[in-house]
Structure formats: structure tokens, C-alpha cells
Amino acid sequence: MNSYEKLIRGYNEFRGRYLGKENLDWRNWAKERQAPKVMIIACSDSRVNPIIVTHAALGDIFVVNNVANLVPPYKEGKLTHHSTSAAIEYAVNHLHVEHIVVMGHSGCGGIRALMSDNEEAEDIDQEKGAYSFIKPWMKIVEEAADFTEEEKERYDEEELLCMCEKRAVLISLNNLATFPWVKKSVLSGHLKIHAWHFDIASGVLLEYDRAEDDFIALK
């Protein structure tokens, strides 16, 4: 069975459950509208689907996926083309979600590209077209890769990568707060924003704790 055939088989299994009588009321309601209480901004990485990680059901989460789960800073103007910004606007102003989560993860390819400081390799990449969109996109969180000399000496490459992933999530969280409708909803108490980091190898999900200024395992 090839990868495409696997998708079709999975769809047929899903459809068998979806069309069950136990889902009739939900289908009748859901065909007209959605009312998720949570928005998750996650990476496009195939290993970290937030629906699977949280064991959520259809309709539970309004999901946005992009490379490295980035949130750009708020920017007005008709010439801007931020699909993530549009999704945030819709989630807050129309769906009235109660939580927004920025979910980072281990082994992020976008963050690894950000950390690459090999100028010769970058020039070659540009000639080949590789990273022609990724590297400019990653500039949104470029400060996350600014390590001190002490940090570079103390931590190995994988540890620095993990640090960069978490810092990038926090930059995106701060960028999220620059959207006026997000800020208004947070101040009114209707909306809460969160930063997560999922470790693929261990399956541990961390949440940023402001009081501790650190990522703490969720229980």
C-alpha cells in the first residue's frame, strides 16, 4: 500500500465512524457553524499534529499550521499577506475563542534553518532556491538565535536548538499580544494566551510558566 492509498483507507475508516448514529446530532449542528473555544498555532511538521497530541475531536480546536509555528507582529496595511494574522483575527473577533496556544516542538527544521550561520551554504541554498521563503519567514524570530558566547560554550548544538525553539515560541507569544483585538480580549479576561513546547522523543508537553520564567511539564 502506498502513502496515498493509506490516506484513502484511513478516510474510509473515518467515514464509517463519522456517519454513525452517535454523531448525527453533531453533524446536523456542525454543518452550519463551528464554535471552538481554543485556537492552536502549530508547526507544519507532520510529527506534531495538535489534534492528535491533545486527543481532540472535530470542532474542538481552530488550528493554524505554518513553518515553525510563528506569529508575525501585528502590521496594518492592505499590502500585507499574513494568513496567520487573518486566522488570529477570525478566531478572536468571530469565533471568540477563549484560549490561544502557540505550540513549538523539538527538532524543528525552521528553527534549525534560523540557527544556520554558514554564509557559504546560505548562498548556495539561495542559488538552488532552497530556503528562498523559509529564511525570510524565520526572520520573525531571529532574536531567538542570538546566543551569548557563554551559552555557545556551555551547550551543545541540540541543547541550543531546544533553547532557540522555546525562545521563538515566546517571541511569537509576545507578537500575538501586539494584535489590538487580542490585547483587548486578554485585558477583558475573555482570552488567555499560552506557550507550549512538545518533545517528540519523550512525548512530554511543556507549558511556559510566567511565575517560574520557564517551561514546565503539563500534568
Image (cartoon, rainbow, N blue to C red):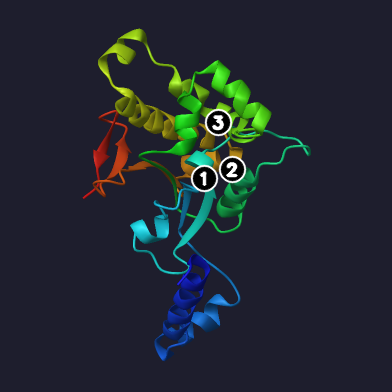
Could you tell me the amino acid type at mark 2?
Trp
Residue 181 is marked as 2
Decide if residue 17 is on the left or right side of residue 201: right
Q: In which quarter of the image is the N terminus?
A: bottom left
Residue of label 1: 185
Q: Is mark 1 on a helix, strand or loop?
A: helix
Report the residue at 31% width, 14% height from top: 151
Decide if residue 192 is on the left or right side of residue 125: left
Could you tell me the amino acid type at mark 3?
Met
Residue 138 is marked as 3
Would you say the residues marked 1 and 3 are in contact, meaning their CB atoms lie under 8 Å apart?
no
* Location of residue 15 in the rendering, given as x and y in whole percent from the top left corner: 48, 82
Report the residue at 44% width, 17% height from top: 146
From the viewer's side, name the closer residue of 24 and 110. Answer: 110
Q: What element carries label 2?
A: helix
* Location of residue 157 in the rendering, given as x and y in whole percent from the top left corner: 33, 24
Spatial separation of the CA atoms under disc 1 and disc 3: 27 Å
Report the residue at 39% width, 16% height from top: 147
Between label 2 and label 3, give the one nearer the viewer: 3
